């Protein structure tokens, strides 16, 4: 039987009003959803952070406090790639595993405040390691499985991680992804810049693992020997919980730092609200734990709320299309949260495949990471949700910690492809180019006024950059980097990034990240990376490259290949461009800035309507670029 949503439009309005009228009282009350060692006496951030005098431990909130009431309930279902491999852990079992891991980390010399890097495929040890770090007060730094060795080395160096948890391999269909070998390469790239003393290895398969004497150890025997009791650290609400790297419009990826009390309050509050979380739900968020969605809605939100989370090791259509639907059917998933890219890919397989499965357990569907187009929204809602499930399009970012603008089942009327309305306590504003707030139905730059419990604390080791990136562009507002349209009823439609971040399949890629990587190729004098609309991925990455003068035809022919290889090596395969154009120059303003607006239009095949080109330093280049695109 389908349960009805907990909220009605009326009860939700009370929540919104309460958050608006007395935010201090509202958030103090909401913080009581957590178990505090010392309950905070103040909520709002008046300079010393959210819930500043509260103390707590996140793993206690996600595990210990559920033991009495639901110790034997399933906390986690792991579905392996083989249909037959399923692991279920009750809260009691997960607690024991997390404690054992916490002890292994402590015994390996990890102390409160240290950073621990986690680089794992879709195995349970990822979530266990995150919670174990939280238990002993260490910060986790989860690294996306698709990062290259160079990208890993950069993040290990920046974070100063002292220990790494990785796997021998990851399974991807018949393929084996060499996690440990990639990590070894990363650790060997610039050892002098790294603080890693120990590498613990999860054996995902029986494949042989090369171990370096004195540094590496297999995890299983250590866990087996460890005690399953582990004293939790008492953390301040404002102590950092984790560091997560994300791409911005300038320079290298930045380590976004999230706190403890505010972040967990936000994760728990938003998870309950937007997914209408109820006892007995089986919650499946398909994100990799290497992204923020995997932090807040694979691990922390569901566990803080005593829910059951599902982890799937495999891919949507392996060994055959329909695999995801099979997982939903087998485990009676009630809540299914994924990305528009995945929805579009599944949609392209047709309606007949999902039609073979019983998806009647589903109650709430969710979308995140990029704007969802009307067609994908409708298909997801009608074909997968059978028209009876709420579809929550949740807009948020690594920096916001959790959802900010989203439908709330039962409480907010849907509009296809709209993220709908801000959550309680979230105050979005749309600004014009000059930073003036716009009223009513308009399109503008999306900023958020005031703070909210889940907001990131800072950028690791660079608070000045946090200020410059988010708080200074439009003084008095938090700058999101996104554009949005608002309709007459206050509904929001996110239009995409207004800065130089490209969103490919929900993965943030900075133009500067790509251009920096390419600056190392000897034969290139400059480059520009842009995103253009892509049917499946939302945006596709396009790179314009200016070769040095005087290169031979053979050298030119080799250049495109070098571009692809360099990006794969420096960033990761997920950032490999759709197309690479060799061009004589990049259109520039007189002050030397690449004019990306033009580059985007030309890459889309436009040949006219570029507006006034006389402000360019090199207007003649436009015709040359059009010719290059026309030839390719
Ligand atoms: C985009 C992912 C439209 C947006 C949680 C944002 C979205 C960036 C949506 C953050 C959505 C995320 N509709 N766009 N529902 N959700 N985005 O940090 O551009 O990986 O700024 O966090 O993804 O990506 P991030």
Image (tube, grey):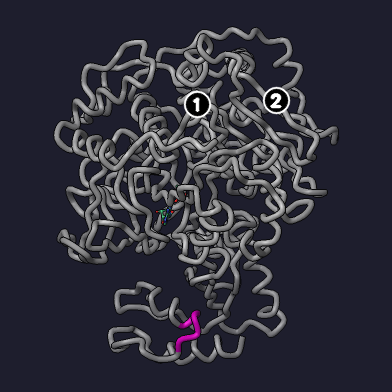
Dot 2: what SS? loop
Question: Quick check: 467 above or below 109?
Answer: below
Comparing marks 2 and 1, which lies closer to the viewer? Answer: 1
Mark identifier at residue 592: none
How far, Cα to Cα, is label 2 from label 1?
44 Å
Residue 612 drawn at (x, y percent): 29, 88
Q: Position of residue 211 (x, y in %)?
A: 78, 29
Asked if the residue at label 2 sits under 8 Å from ligand 1, the reply is: no
Give left or right: position of 506 versus 348: left
Magenta residues span 602-606
Q: Which residue is drawn at 39% across and 26% down?
A: 260
* Quarter the C terminus occupies: bottom right
Q: Nearer the viewer, residue 45 or 93?
A: 93
Which residue carries the number 2 mark? 215
Give the farthest residue toward the front.
1
x 55%, y 85%: residue: 629
Q: Does the magenta stretch include residue 445?
A: no
Mark sitting earlier along the chain (2/1): 2
Q: Count neighbours of disc 1 (C-alpha within 10 A) and say few if under 14, some if 14 to 19, many if 20 or more.
A: few
According to the picture, the residue beneath numbered tag 1 turns out to be: 279
Q: In which quarter of the image is residue 194?
A: top right
Residue 506 visible within the image: no
Rendered location of residue 463, percent (x, y): 32, 39
């Amino acid at each position: 039987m389908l349960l009805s949503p907990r909220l009605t439009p009326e009860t939700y309005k009370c929540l919104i009003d309460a958050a608006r009228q007395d935010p201090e009282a509202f958030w103090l009350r909401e913080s009581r959803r957590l178990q505090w060692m010392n309950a905070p006496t103040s909520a709002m951030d008046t300079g010393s952070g959210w819930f500043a005098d509260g103390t707590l431990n996140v793993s206690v909130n996600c595990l210990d406090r559920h033991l009495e009431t639901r110790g034997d309930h399933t906390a986690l279902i792991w579905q392996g790639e083989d249909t037959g491999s399923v692991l279920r852990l009750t809260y009691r079992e997960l607690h024991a595993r997390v404690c054992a891991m916490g002890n292994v980390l402590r015994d390996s010399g990890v102390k409160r405040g240290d950073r621990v890097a986690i680089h794992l495929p879709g195995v349970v040890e990822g979530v266990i390691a995150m919670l174990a770090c939280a238990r002993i007060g260490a910060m986790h730094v989860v690294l996306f499985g698709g990062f290259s060795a160079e990208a890993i080395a950069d993040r290990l160096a920046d974070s100063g991680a002292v220990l790494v948890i990785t796997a021998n391999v990851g399974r991807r269909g018949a393929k084996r992804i060499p996690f440990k070998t990639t990590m070894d390469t990363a650790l060997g790239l610039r050892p002098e810049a790294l603080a890693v003393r120990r590498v613990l290895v999860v054996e995902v398969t029986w494949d042989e693992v090369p171990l370096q004497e004195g540094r590496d150890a297999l995890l299983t025997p250590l866990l087996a020997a460890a005690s399953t009791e582990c004293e939790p650290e008492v953390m301040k609400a404002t102590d950092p919980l984790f560091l997560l790297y994300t791409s911005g419009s300038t320079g290298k990826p930045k380590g976004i730092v999230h706190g403890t009390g505010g972040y967990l309050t936000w994760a728990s509050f938003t998870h309950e609200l937007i997914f209408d979380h109820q006892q007995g739900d089986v919650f499946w968020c398909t994100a990799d734990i290497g992204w923020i969605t995997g932090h807040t809605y694979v691990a922390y939100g569901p566990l803080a709320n005593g829910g059951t989370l599902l982890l799937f090791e495999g891919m949507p259509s392996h060994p055959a299309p329909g695999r995801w639907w099979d997982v939903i059917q087998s485990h009676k998933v009630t809540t299914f949260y994924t990305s528009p890219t995945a929805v579009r890919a599944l949609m392209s397989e047709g309606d007949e495949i999902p039609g073979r499965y019983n998806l009647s357990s589903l109650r709430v569907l969710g979308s995140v990471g990029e704007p969802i187009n009307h067609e994908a929204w409708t298909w997801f809602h009608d074909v997968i949700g059978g028209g009876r499930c709420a579809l929550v399009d949740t807009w948020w970012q690594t920096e916001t910690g959790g959802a900010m603008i989203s439908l709330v089942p039962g409480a907010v009327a849907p509009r296809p492809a709209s993220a709908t309305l801000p959550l309680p306590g979230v105050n979005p504003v749309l600004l014009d180019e000059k930073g003036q707030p716009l009223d009513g139905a308009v399109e503008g730059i999306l900023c958020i006024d005031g703070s909210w419990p889940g907001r990131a604390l800072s950028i690791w080791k660079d608070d000045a950059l946090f200020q410059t990136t988010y708080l200074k562009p439009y003084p008095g507002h938090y700058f999101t980097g996104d554009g949005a349209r608002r309709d007459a009823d206050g509904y929001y439609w996110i239009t995409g990034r207004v800065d130089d971040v490209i969103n490919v399949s929900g993965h943030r890629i900075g133009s500067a990240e790509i251009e920096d990587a390419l600056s190392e190729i000897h034969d290139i004098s400059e480059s520009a990376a842009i995103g253009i609309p892509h049917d499946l991925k939302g945006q596709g990455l396009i790179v314009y490259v200016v070769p040095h003068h005087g290169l031979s035809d053979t050298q030119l022919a080799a250049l495109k290949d070098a571009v692809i290889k360099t990006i794969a090596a420096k960033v990761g395969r997920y950032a490999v461009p759709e197309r690479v154009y060799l061009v004589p120059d990049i259109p520039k303003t007189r002050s030397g800035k690449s004019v990306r607006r033009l580059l985007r239009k030309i890459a889309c095949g436009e040949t006219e309507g570029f507006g006034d080109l006389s402000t360019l330093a090199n207007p003649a280049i436009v015709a040359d670029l059009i010719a290059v695109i026309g030839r390719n």
